[in-house]
Amino acid sequence: MFSLELSEMHEMIRQTARDFAQNDVAPSSVERDKEGIFPTEIVKKLGELGFLGMMVEPEWGGAGMDALSYVIAMEEISAVDASVGVVMSVNNSLVNWGLQTYGTDAQKERWLKPLAAGEIHGAFCLSEPEAGSDATQQHTTAERGEGGWILNGTKNWITNGTTASTYLVMAQTDRDLKHKGITCFIIPRDTPGFEPGLKEDKLGIRSSDTCSIGLTNVFVPDDQVLGQVGQGFKIAMESLNGGRIGIAAQALGIAKGAFEAALRYSTERTAFGKPISNLQAIQMKLADMATRLEAARMLVYRAAWMKDQHQNYIKAAAQAKLMASQAAVHIALEAIQVHGGYGYVREYLVERYLRDAKITEIYEGTSEIQHIVIARELLKEIGA
Ligand code: CAA
């Protein structure tokens, strides 16, 4: 049974993340969003604080914390800047997790240690121009060469794509085996033929970098295969189960930031001779926003707790992401409404919450995919 007990350590992590977000992240967030500037210095500091390798064992350079600590830190940082949140989420959930779970000791020493210590950050390359939700349809191929594999293809929508140093790349090693013929490769950025494209010009999370990556005759030696040949799709799906908790926490942070902005503004703005927080129309909105926010928080913390308890968290992660991303979009919209015209202009910041929230309903599995995952798990539970 889910029991939520936050320890002193969790509260300390919350405070550290909150202070970091206010002092180091907030001052440059407007400019970075406007100009699409990657938060290089902030990511360096994230690494120094241990936030890029939160759940990695200390022997591999990480902070050795639990998933609950991770979602708390993600929530606080994303409440101030969701672009910084996604850099952190991809590194922790989609890159470090796979390396820690499936890597050999030699791979962990070489690839995981610097990623977990935050000296560098990584990217996860599953999506392709024609393989988004339908992720088994990998067109990137890996053909056998001497002592390794030769990869060709294109990856799409790669978060951290232009700035990462280490990439986990899924490619088809045996088409006849369908998803059981997909393999995961560890590829450093400077590998010949591995070419990150131009940064996408996005609606939201504009300070994070997203790009396509071209692979032309990229040679990857055998010791850079993660897990077994043919195990790549399983690694990707399992990584995404945890990734969905990270994105759910990012959405929770966006919802919290938007709600708190609306609550504060409602006490400052007067209309009809009193603060608008006295108007029932506004109170209804605030009550509804607060309730959705708390519901999302419970699902996100529960999914993290289940992961920490080594329970099956596939459904819980999908439910948390579905609920928190919907809450983020709804609460961000309502925060704009509470601000009226001021909510629609950049100066007041609330419009950014809406732009940032929308992607949480799309990446690491759309809301439609989360419904599929939840329904399949429900049916499995009753043996259907
Ligand atoms: N956890 C573990 N294993 C899973 C799984 C999960 N959540 N979902 C599927 N699998 C396994 C299945 O058990 C099956 O394995 P076996 O054959 O060994 O039994 C295998 O994967 C194939 O599953 P299905 O037969 O169910 O395949 P499908 O094509 O019908 O459905 C899917 C698969 C669930 C739709 C899957 O393709 C999916 O999750 N799609 C969404 C992909 C996604 O989330 N992409 C995000 C891109 S990454 C990103 O956004 C990163 C970023 O940069 C921010």
Image (cartoon, helix red, strand yellow):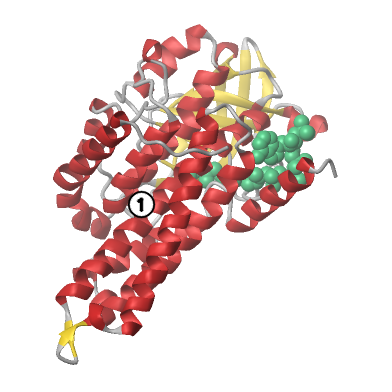
Which percent across, then down, holds residue 258? 31, 63
Say if residue 192 shows up in the picture. no
168 on left or right of 58? right
Q: Give the residue at the far bottom of this rendering.
A: 272
Which percent across, then down, holds residue 286? 34, 71
Counting the numbered discs, the total is 1
Crowd around label 1: few <14 · some 14–19 · many ≥20 (10 Å): many
Q: Amino acid at mark 1?
A: Gly
Which percent across, then down, holds residue 191? 46, 24
Q: Residue at x 73, y 47 (%)?
A: 378
Image quadrant occupied by the N terminus: top right
- Out of 365 and 14, give the one closest to the viewer: 14
Q: Residue at x 51, y 42 (%)?
A: 302
Residue matched to label 1: 253
Residue 147 lies, with reference to residue 364, above or below; the image says above
Which percent across, then down, holds residue 67? 44, 32
Q: Residue at x 29, y 45 (%)?
A: 77
Q: Give the residue at the far top of this rendering.
A: 106
